[in-house]
Amino acid sequence: MTVTTNDDTKKEHETLLEIEGLKKYFPISTGFFGKTKQYVKAVDGIDLIVKKGETLGIVGESGCGKSTTGNTILRLLEPTEGKIIFDGSDITKLSERGMQKIRKDIQMVFQDPFSSLNPRMRVFDIIAEPLRTHKVAKGKELEQTVYELMETVGLDRSFSGRYPHEFSGGQRQRIGIARALALKPKLIICDEPVSALDVSIQAQILNLLMDLQKRFNLTYIFIAHGIPAVKYISDRIAVMYMGEVVELSSKDELFSHTLHPYTRGLISSVPIPDPTLRERKEQFILEDDLPDQTDLPSGCRFYTRCPFRKEKCKVEKPEFRNVGDEHFVSCHYPIM
């Protein structure tokens, strides 16, 4: 599948990141001599386009490959196959020195706001580290930039001498966001940035990310396993299952015309707080457990859990196709 627009000039202007056939396999060594016989196909041939200024949400159950996708885009993990075209350049084959330049434009906000911060470094030095590494600022300019970044994310500059353990989870995540902003990136990959936070704090961080996007014209890839957070912040949403994207569309289209049974199951799993509305909600329970990632079904990977499965699904892999209005789905029998 290749996601394209009819106007190539417009696509070139709008597209910041294009992923073509991206794969990431992890070998499993078995036997006395450690010979590789099997692979975990964490990411198995996905195609995505991220447009400038948008938020592309990636959602799915734990183990579906969404975080591996984010790490592979940034080349924290080396891709097994495929192309990663960032701002018009294929970064897949770049050396580590070449990637160091690219990483000024691609930053990441990590899931755990505590383990992602060096406990031995003060907040000032954590935020200043990328500025020093890339020789962007020094002296008074460095000091002023760090203080401005702290205030931008809602932290008082008087906190600059403190260590990460002296902050709450939400404050630590703000530190991580300030560090990601330091080099004025074009793309920020947010890898489940609110999953470790209380619900009220999650809303604050999501609102902060949205405000920063408008202020600095940022582009986000927002990775999460929780539907509400992805729905709140995203412009388009890609649904991943067992290393593949099974549905992709705009946020409004995805929730008003859900086509893939797996997507329907994810949405149905979100609890409704109002008891008067619970009986009206369509119950769509996913069957069984995830299949073995070293022995995936030969046809549709969702076959073993799908209540609408037919014989064709077992033997023939569905095509990831556009069914209209840039709504893509990988299913022989989408819910229409």
Image (cartoon, grey):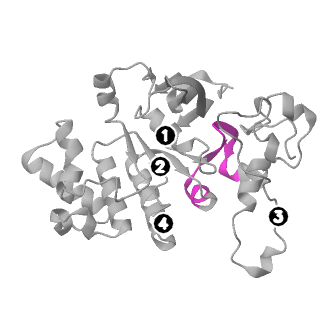
Task: Report if residue 47 is visible in the image.
Answer: no
Q: Secondary structure at mark 1?
A: helix
Q: Is residue 249 magenta?
A: yes
Asked if the residues shown at circle 1 and circle 2 are in contact, with their CB atoms under 8 angstroms apart, the answer is: yes
Q: Position of residue 216 (x, y in %)?
A: 37, 48
Tell me which segment is drawn in magenta: 229-252
Left or right of residue 333: residue 129: left
Distance CA(mark 1)–CA(mark 3): 31 Å
Q: Earlier in the sequence, mark 3 or mark 2?
A: 2
* Callout in the foreground (1, 4): 1
Q: Secondary structure at mark 3?
A: loop
Q: Is residue 200 magenta?
A: no
Within-10-Å neighbours for mark 3: few <14, some 14–19, many 20+: few
Q: Which mark is residue 283?
A: 3
Q: Position of residue 45 (x, y in %)?
A: 62, 27
Reading the image, the residue beneath label 2 is 191
Reading the image, the residue beneath label 1 is 70
Task: Examine the rendered structure and indicate whether residue 185 appears above or below residue 9.
Answer: below
Reading the image, the residue beneath label 4 is 202
Q: Position of residue 196 (x, y in %)?
A: 46, 63
Q: What residue is shown at x 27% (from left), y 66% (from top)?
A: 165
Left or right of residue 309: residue 121: left
In this rendered view, identify the residue nearer to me: 133 or 327. Answer: 133
Residue lying at the far front of the rendered structure = 32
Distance CA(mark 1)–CA(mark 4): 20 Å
